[in-house]
Image (cartoon, grey):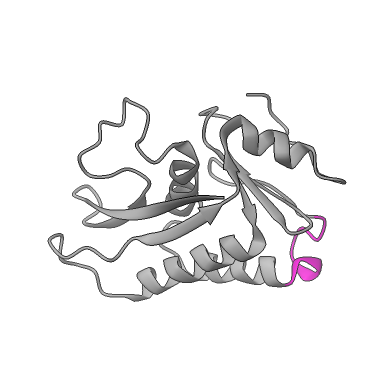
């Protein structure tokens, strides 16, 4: 298991905190200190769920009751930039745009992240000098290893792009 943190960085453009896998002193042109898996997860929250508590609630509901979700087979496909594939107790989140930004985790691990992200969205974090606490994140693997593990699961949907 890998243990990382989603950091909340102040965006001057949006005038709000946004989830990030990078620390404020990092140059995004180089390998992130925490690796690419946490970047994928933070980017998925930021780009596909955005700041919508409703979107977070939909994903929580999807994970809790997959059989009655819009994709009972777990093939949620692609959102703004990220694919979400669920097989058994495993969730794969990845993008075809950055080959390293792939992550695999359990449903329980993702539910924890979503609940923490929802708590952040419900909070009042308007002061750029007073950031919210990071979200502790645990996942199984990132990058090509995440793809290989997911593709090796019985009845997986197979990652629909090659990295």
- Vertical position of residue 39 compared to residue 69: above or below: above
The spot of residue 137 in percent (x, y) is: 47, 57
Q: Is residue 147 above or below residue 117?
A: above
Observer-nearest of 99 and 59: 99
Quadrant showing the C terminus: top right
Range covered by the magenta-colored residues: 65-73
> At 65% across and 72% down in the image, what residue appears?
61
Front in this rendered view, residue 15 or 19: 19
Residue 69 located within the stretch drawn in magenta: yes
Q: Is residue 116 left or right of residue 104?
A: left
Residue 12 seen in the figure:
yes
- Give the x, y percent position of residue 96: 59, 30
Q: Residue furthest left?
A: 129
Q: Is residue 159 above or below residue 71?
A: above
Q: Position of residue 71 (x, y in %)?
A: 77, 58
Tell me the residue at 81%/44% (across/down): 153
Q: Nearer the viewer, residue 46 or 139?
A: 139
Asked whether residue 103 appears in the rendered view, the answer is no
Q: Position of residue 115 (x, y in %)?
A: 49, 71
> Which residue does the image show at 59% across and 47% down from the upper left?
79
Q: Say if the magenta span includes residue 40.
A: no
């Amino acid at each position: 298991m890998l243990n990382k943190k989603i950091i909340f960085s102040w965006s001057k453009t949006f005038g709000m905190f946004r989830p990030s896998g990078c620390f404020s002193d990092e140059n995004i042109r180089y390998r992130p200190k925490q690796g690419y898996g946490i970047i994928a997860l933070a980017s998925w929250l930021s780009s596909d769920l955005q700041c919508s508590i409703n979107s977070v609630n939909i994903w929580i509901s999807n994970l809790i009751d997959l059989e009655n979700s819009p994709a009972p087979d777990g093939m949620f496909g692609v959102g703004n930039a990220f694919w979400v594939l669920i097989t058994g107790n495993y969730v794969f989140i990845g993008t075809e745009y950055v080959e390293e930004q792939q992550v695999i985790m359990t449903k329980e691990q993702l539910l924890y992240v979503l609940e923490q992200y929802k708590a952040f969205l419900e909070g009042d974090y308007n002061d750029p000098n007073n950031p919210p606490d990071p979200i502790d994140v645990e996942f199984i693997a990132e990058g090509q290893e995440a793809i290989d593990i997911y593709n090796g699961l019985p009845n997986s949907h197979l990652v629909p792009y090659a990295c």
